[in-house]
Image (cartoon, rainbow, N blue to C red):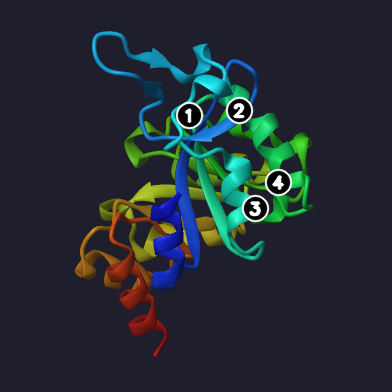
Amino acid sequence: MEAFRLAVRLGATGLESDVWCTADGVPVLDHDGRVGRWPRRRAISTITLGEVPATMPTLAALLADVDSGLAVSLDVKDPAAATPVIQSAAIDETTGRLWLCHPDHEVVASWRDLDPRVHLVHSTRVDRIGSSLERHAMELASAGIDGVNLPEPEWSAGLVKLFRRFDLACLGWDAQHRRQIDRLMALGLDGIYGDHVDRLVDGLAAGCS
């Protein structure tokens, strides 16, 4: 939790994490979805909340800890977590701050009816899109998906223009260096993901000046 608090203190305008669901239906935030030491590591989906390490925050704890206006982007590693994730934000009526990402756009589309306010994102790579990019953008928009998330090197002015034609938000991940952040800022992306909050904040300030 302290890492999220530090990001907020540094000026982050949004937070990102991977989310998993425990066996008793509680969304928790973790990178690899397993607990314990090798060779007895266990999947989060097989343990209850009481067995989760104290250092692993629940989504509910994060949402209660940060300002309700702060965007929270979640890579939904376990599709079964989508419903409890939305329910966690619905408690304080802030589902509109959620951006739920997944690599299977059909899975993402299946979440549309859970809450009309949540933002849905297809997180992928260009070479994993089976159809033409224009057709894919049309399919995402038709399914009620709000954005597409691609790795930093794949974004271009042409791609931004294409997805914007279908009112899709353009998000870029793995922007670790200022040159990458500055490039995405110049392209006008709606959101940029990276591990270095200070660089992201500095890049945002420079892009807005």
Write down the residue under mark 3.
64
Write down the residue under mark 2.
81
Q: Amino acid at mark 1?
A: Lys
Report how far apart the C-alphas of labels 2 and 3 lie in the structure.
18 Å
Q: Amino acid at mark 3?
A: Ala
Q: Residue at x 52, y 43 (%)?
A: 74
Crowding at mark 2 (Cα within 10 Å: few <14, some 14-19, many 20+): many
Q: Nearer the viewer, residue 37 or 140?
A: 37
Name which quarter of the figure residue 204 lies in. bottom left
Q: Is residue 18 above or below residue 52?
A: below
Q: Amino acid at mark 4?
A: Ala
Q: Is residue 81 above or below residue 60?
A: above
- Indicate which label's residue lies in the foreground, 1 or 3: 3
Callout 1 secondary element: loop
Q: Is residue 100 above or below residue 46?
A: below
Q: Amino acid at mark 2?
A: Ala
For marks 4 and 2, the one nearer the N-term is: 2
Write down the residue under mark 1.
77
Dots 1 and 3: beta carbons under 8 Å?
no
